[in-house]
Image (spheres, rainbow, N blue to C red):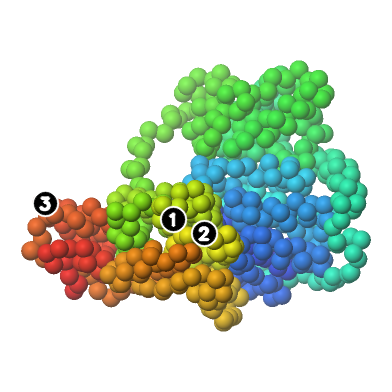
Amino acid sequence: MSKKYVMGNGAIALGALSAGVNLISGYPGTPSSEIIETASKYPHEGTYLEWSVNEKAAMEVAAAAAYCGARAMVTMKQVGLNVASDPLMSLAYVGVKGGMVVVAADDPGPISSQTEQDTRRFAEFARIPVFDPSSPEEAFEMVKDAFAYSEKYKTPVILRPTTRVDHAYASIEAPDSFRAGEYEGFVKDSKKWVIFPRLSYANHMVIEKRNTEIGEDFSSYRFNTVTGSSKKAVIATGVSYAYAAEFLKDYPEVRLIKVGAPYPMPESFLLRALEGVTEALCFEELSPFIEESLLKLVGKHRLDIKVRGKLSGDVPSAGENDTDSARRIIGGFLRLEADNSGAELSSAPEPPARPPVLCAGCPHRASFYAVKQAMKGKKAYFCGDIGCYTLGNAMPLDMVDTCLCMGAGITMAQGFNHMDSDAVAVSFAGDSTFFASGITGVVNAVYNAADMIVCILDNSTTAMTGHQPHPGTGRNLMSAPVDKISIEKILIAAGVKKVVTVDPLELDEAIKAVKECAEVKGVKAIIFKSPCVAIVKPDKKMRVNSSCVGCMRCIKEIGCPALSVNDGRVVIDENLCTGCGLCSKLCKVGAIGGV
């Protein structure tokens, strides 16, 4: 055993390994990506690790392991749970034998997501327990508890960390190497493992009865706690509890109730914790989950308690909580003086605005620019997707008209085509996204006779979430060399009329390829293939010579962050420039060259 200074995701990984987990699968998505990556860095005898092609596949791989009696964990971010919800909902009815923990990391803010959805709602919808850690240390312990509860009640369970827990750091005491636990193996029993309507009905009855038992069990759960004895109570969950506890440390008399396992509701615990309370503030992020649970409890038992929170307008209905909001909201609830805490609200200046932008030298910039040039003078719809290439929406590229969810760009372009056949429908997706959820969209396009251009921006990695491998990289998470799956061959096999592979940094060829595809009826595909600049960096830089006339065309048309203006002339920041050469191809006077 030794102390390890790890981020919250690392603590979750160490907790799972300490619990003897046999299999961990998942799909990368911030803020959850580092869980599997951390697990892979420690000796883990007998534990299989996998980056799955998407969250649904990851959930189903883990489910089979749990059917064998093995301990399995599957990781994803909150929107990934949407993709995995089909198997999860059925798993709740079928149940498991070995412990199965679904880690779904929520992203209040949102900081790196397209939604602020609350996974506690999914747990309630699926009728399965959820654990809500408030710190990396708690997350480490809760993973182990989650496995135990899963096996005790034969159900998958959810661990729901949030971004600030995932990315906080703490010292965790854990072994230096790990060994997976023993398991029985799969025992065939079609009456148990094959889901039929009659079985589902019977199991639904069992689930509702079981959840009452789990709620009672949770009432003595060690991470459901209460301190203080005032008639006003603050009820908090997740990282919001840490903010509340920080503010209330100078007010130990204030009753602070922590709900570490919010579903099924620990009714007996809350009834005990609320004895003598006349007013309660629910301090939580995202949805008013605890607040609604408390309102139900108050109504059921006819308690004379005024419940406040998001529904009453006392807590914001969106965004993150933090120490300042805890001081403001809880201080107002307790009617404390403005300077009660001994510290003023943070007076630090707001950080400068820093909108996300494609990296200097990113080949996606060239891909978008090539399509933009080829489509000049044409009516076109540009359907984007989730990943680095979402950033193609930024000016001056302005090449993403829609972005809904992963894989939707390919299918939405079909909808535009069917509604407006006079326009050119173009979709953009990355290589990892293509494997995760783009293939079915291509099949749908061919089957339904769409007329569109599918652009695959292949930079040979899953860039935005940390460069994880995928089926097209030739390696997997277990470091085994595997056959690369060819995007081109998949497209051809699906019946795409024309497939062209081109380096987007060869700008003239890229523009020509787009124009050629636009002249072909049916589904066409262009694979813009160039490695991510964070992995493969060119060995030259670009510089501006004295012939620059200050037209600013390079800046106005591609928006590379390495380009700026000084005294009316373009300058290139050599610390950012990667030498991709795209700017030199735009310069009409030859003022930009490589050195």
Instruction: Measuring from the top left, give residue 64's x and y in whole percent.
Output: 77, 66
Instruction: Measuring from the top left, give residue 360's x and y in whole percent.
Output: 31, 61
In the image, is residue 560 above or below residue 254?
A: below
- The three-letter code of the residue at mark 1 reads Ala
In the image, is residue 190 above or below residue 286?
A: below
First of labels 3, 1 by sequence position: 1
Q: Is residue 361 left or right of residue 32?
A: left
Mark 2 crowdedness (10 Å alpha carbons): few <14, some 14-19, many ≥20: many
The N terminus: image quadrant: bottom right
Residue at numbered disc 3: 568
What mark, if any, has residue 425 been given in the picture?
Answer: 1
Q: Which residue sits at x=78%, y=54%? A: 90
The C terminus: image quadrant: bottom left
- The three-letter code of the residue at mark 3 reads Gly
Tag 1–tag 2 contact (CB < 8 Å): yes
Nearest-to-viewer mark from 1 and 2: 2
First of labels 2, 3 by sequence position: 2
Instruction: Measuring from the top left, give residue 431's x and y in whole percent.
Output: 49, 67
